[in-house]
Image (cartoon, helix red, strand yellow):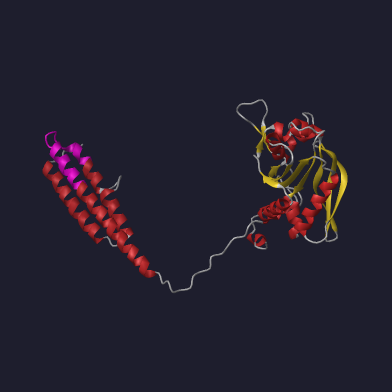
Amino acid sequence: MTAVSLESFLDQLRQFRADASAALDAASDAAAFEAARVEFLGARSGRLKAIQKQLGGLSVADKPAAGRHFNEAKATVEALLTAAQDRVAATTAGVTAEAIDVTLPGTPVPLGHVHPITQTIRRVQEIMGRLGFESVDGPEVEDQWHNFQALAIGAEHPARDPLDNFYLAVARGADPLLLRSQTSTVQIRVMETRQPPLRIVSLGRVYRPDTADATHYPMFHQVEGLLVEKGTTMAHLKSVLRLFASSFLGGDVHVRFRPSFFPFTEPSVEVDMEWGGRWIEMGGAGMVDPAVLEAVGYDPREVSGFAFGLGVERIAARRYGVADIRDFYRNDVRFLQQF
């Protein structure tokens, strides 16, 4: 460390204060203020930092006095810095306010659109609400009990194949979790906590490792309806679906059932809807299997119920005339502005 005399050190402090005062007084805008701050008080290359390094070159006897003068100079310049900052901020605010001509016409702000999938979900909830169905929701990450076992999907059923589901590894636990493959899981969760009569509809995202094409996507939305009470029949199921379809699609919509198989309904059917002269497969439905009722503590000898599941993307595509459901997720503003 080069030896430094106390007199030389004090001369540098006096010059430092004089230069800082002149530069800060001359700062008329934020850029000039910031340049002065960095020059004099910058943490790495500021002049005060360079002067501070010279303290080590002073004699032991001179260091107390030098330190006192150094702190005084630092405090003085910091006070000047605060005053200059307030002055520049006040000046800038005044200029900005004066620069705005409030008599000029405003620039229109472009408004976005509610996504067609969201529009469809809201519309379905509104229609089903008028039919007496409560809208409910549940977790998208599920355990195997709610996603499979409680729905009468046994351990050997092909629907549980790892290639047909998105399983998630967990730190602890014998069974892995998975992204739910159907919103029927919500129905199980509600039935576990409530007693009949029950009318619910659940809408949300589900996940299956499907190859994306015009009618499939690895993430899509489902609407699941469930009604459980005494005396429920397939006629009630078909009536609800027809009322829903007529309300959503408008006009005279025909609904037909085709025999099918689902582990959690018996009998099970595929649901087709005809609108505008064309039949479209919309989802599956059926009477709730007695085994499912027993799994949640219901007595199948006392109550019966029906359940149905429809694809929201298919409903939306049919309603809006969309030929490829991938268009819903391409984030093309030109496409979304049409709705």
The image quarter containing residue 192 is top right
Residue 130 vertical placement versus 167 (above, below): below
The answer to whether 56 appears left or right of 104 in the picture is left
Q: Using the rendered image of the protein, determine whether residue 227 is visible from the camera's viewpoint.
A: yes
Where is residue 316 shown, x and y percent of the image? 73, 55
Query: With respect to residue 148, does 37 lie above or below?
Result: below
- Tell me how many marks there are: 0
Q: What is the magenta range?
A: 53-74
Q: Position of residue 222 (x, y in %)?
A: 72, 46
Between 296 and 93, the one lying in front of the other is 296
Q: Residue at x 70, y 43 (%)?
A: 206
Q: Is residue 63 magenta?
A: yes
Give the quarter of the figure containing the C terminus: bottom right
Magenta segment, prevailing SS (helix, strand or loop): helix
- Tell me the quadrant of the picture where the N terminus can be found: top left
Q: Give how far across and how far down residue 165 sits, in percent.
A: 72, 37
Q: What residue appears at the point 74 percent right and 36 percent down from the top-left corner?
A: 163
Considering depth in this image, is 310 or 26 the residue closer to the camera? 310
Residue 208 appears in the picture as rendered: no
Which quarter of the figure has residue 120?
bottom right
Q: 333 or 240, which lies in front?
A: 240
